[in-house]
Image: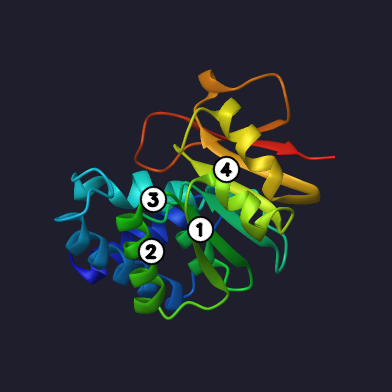
Amino acid sequence: MTREQFITDLASGSGAMGVHLNDLALDRMFLYYTELQRWNRRVNLVSRKEHDWIRVHFLDSLAALGFNLLGKECRVVDLGAGAGFPGVPLKLAREDIFLGMAEASGRKCAWLRHLVRTLSLENIQVLEGRIEDTAKAGRAGCFDVVVSRAAARPSRMLDLSRPFLSDGGRILIYTTEDLLENEGRVYKYRVPGLKAPRVIWEVKIN
């Protein structure tokens, strides 16, 4: 995919979801995409169907911004960050946030550190280790928002997320409606070009 096509498709799709991306964010997103292509050949990061990546990964990650779910300069941690979704697209769109990325796989952490350097990102940290251990290792209560996408079943993610959050913190889980429980608030959305509906499940910690 050419740079022009990628940027056109991403800008159009994000705009339809109520998310504005400036020129710097669009350029960095394309660099992210090209590096993901290169690394994905040797590290299994995402599905190899590259023509779906804009919708399935980049646009889906940005959905929280369409609902204004991240406050100014909030501290966000992406649990089970993997290839960097949803955390990195959120950070590229909103440079003011601090982003932590918790990931157990050493190879995926190497990718995330490479991505941070390549994209010249600041106020971002890779937290290597099991999610349960990372929370105990000095990160408990440090974040305002937990985000997670396909890291584990939503009910399990609630338990894993709570130790990371300060009082009044929130958990945002990207999932499908059939996996939800009777707690919190649900934001329904559709990614342009995809048929399957998606939801963000928000649970607040008192």
**Quick check: can you spot residue 66?**
no
Q: Which amino acid type is marked by label 4?
A: Glu
Decide which of tag 4 and tag 2 comes sooner along the chain. 2
In the picture provided, is 91 more to the left or to the right than 140?
left
Tags 4 and 1 in contact by the CB under 8 Å rule?
A: no
Q: Which amino acid type is marked by label 1?
A: Met
Could you tell me how far apart the alpha carbons at marks 4 and 2 are, in whole angstroms?
19 Å
> What residue is disc 4 on?
132
Tags 1 and 2 in contact by the CB under 8 Å rule?
A: yes
Q: Nearer the viewer, mark 3 or mark 4?
A: 4
Tag of residue 112: 2
Q: Residues within 10 Å of mark 4 (few under 14, many from 20)?
A: some
Decide which of tag 4 and tag 1 comes sooner along the chain. 1
Between residue 77 and residue 47, name the one nearer to us: 77
Tag of residue 101: 1
Where's residue 121, x and y in %? 47, 77
> What residue is disc 3 on?
82
Q: Which amino acid type is marked by label 2?
A: Leu
